[in-house]
Amino acid sequence: MNQYIFQSVQKASRSLALLAAETVNTVLNDLADEAVRQIDALIAENQKDLDRMDPEDPKYDRLKLTDKRIQDIASDIRNVAGLPTPLGKVSLEKELDNGLKIKKVSVPMGVIGVIYEARPNVSFDVFSLCFKTGNACVLKGGSDASYSNAAIISIIHSVLKRHNIDPNVAALLSPDRAATEALLNAVGYVDVIIPRGSQGLIDFVRQNAKVPVIETGAGIVHTYFDASADLEKGKAIVNNSKTRRVSVCNALDCLIIHESRLPDLAAIAEPLITSDVEIFADARAYDSLTNKYPEKLLKVASNEHFGTEFLAYKMSVKTVKDLDEALNHIANYSSKHSEAIVSEDSESIEKFLNAVDAAAVYANASTAFTDGAQFGLGAEIGISTQKLHARGPMGLEELTSYKWIVKGDGQIRA
């Protein structure tokens, strides 16, 4: 069954190259409208998934669809439709001494497989980005979101059929483990696999896939509060990075603070009290927060609290003597996703931005901005933490490859 699906998707993918850009944009705008029209049905199916999950589970928030979230999804789809196509771009063109005319032109990758967990919005995001770039997609959602994903793919297929486009350009595999294994081994049918989810999922895909993988790693995110940092900026940045949405990969996990600013730690942490953020502080930070932060929310940190992606209202605090120690801590524990510095010292800022090895590095801003839509990409298929081909939020450009077009007039090689 799975092989039949892969064959059908691969065959359908070839038809995408013949679609006019105007047709692609019309389909995407129609899909956005249809998603809004189907809000009640989507929420009803999503509720079936929510009913099976503990609301305390960090994945619950990612799983949940609301009226606003679906409206936002539709807006992202329209944004993708409004972006210029990345296909057919000529990045190099020249004529050789022998008269051969050579062009390097952007083209679709072909068939993209995406494995993800309790994130039904990914189904819409992946399809819109793949369709815009002439790629077919194979979606492998988790069992936690099976009702939601089935409803979404049904909407996508209905819109494609309305425009006389083969619905096999987007396929949803069953949520069982056998489908995952089939996708990881779909050599010759799937050109690349992109996992989105926990570190465990990403590690499993990387270790078991025979198809090439683009890693979208877990976000173990730090913000360094420098000796020169502005207190009010820092309070707002830390609070937003931690509490805006704790279940996403760009949420803050560890606050690193310069020892000279420990007297300000209670003020920095004060906004976190409203969200009942549990703090795991090293010894010096713990002493600074004692009797100033709710006792029930303050714990002494152990080694396991550093290098942890909490995905919850939890955060660690590390005290350092200088910027170099902060950089070393980040180098030891970062997942190379998003890292930030709060500082008013230009030399410290430049050193941090140049020295930190991460897909997105911030100065005096919240890490919550690491997002394809926020970066002006329309949407994202994932946030790559690797360095081959793509890094950071992956939008349209990152879903293309290129080919060489060579035109001659009878030339042969000696």
Image (cartoon, rainbow, N blue to C red):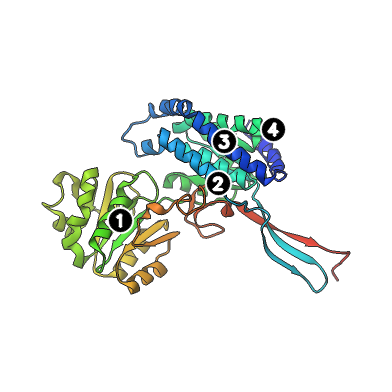
Q: Are marks 4 and 1 in contact (CB under 8 Å)?
A: no
Precedes in sequence: disc 3 or disc 2 = 3
Does label 3 or label 1 sit earlier along the sequence? Answer: 3
Give SS at disc 3. helix
Q: Nearer the viewer, residue 66 or 383?
A: 66
> What secondary structure is marked by label 2?
helix
Q: Secondary structure at mark 1?
A: helix
In the image, what residue occupies the spot 57% across and 39% down?
A: 29
Q: Position of residue 154 (x, y in %)?
A: 57, 29
Query: With respect to residue 68, does 208 lie above or below?
Result: below
270 horizontally vs 58: left or right: left
| Residue located beneath label 4 in the image | 164
Instruction: In this rendered view, identify the residue nearer to me: 3 or 225.
Output: 225
Spatial separation of the CA atoms under disc 3 and disc 1: 36 Å
Res 393 label = none
For label 4, the SS is: loop
Q: Residues within 10 Å of mark 3 (few under 14, many from 20)?
A: many
Q: Amino acid at mark 3?
A: Leu
Ranked by sequence position, the earlier of labels 2 and 1 is 2
Q: Amino acid at mark 2?
A: Val
Q: Residue at x 13, y 53 (%)?
A: 290
The residue sitting at 40% across, 67% down in the picture is: 353
Q: Which residue is mark 1?
A: 237
Residue 31 is tagged as 3
Q: Which residue is mark 2?
A: 80
Residue located farthest toward the left when viewing the structure as drawn: 291
Q: Are marks 2 and 4 in contact (CB under 8 Å)?
A: no
Frontmost of labels 2 and 1 is 2
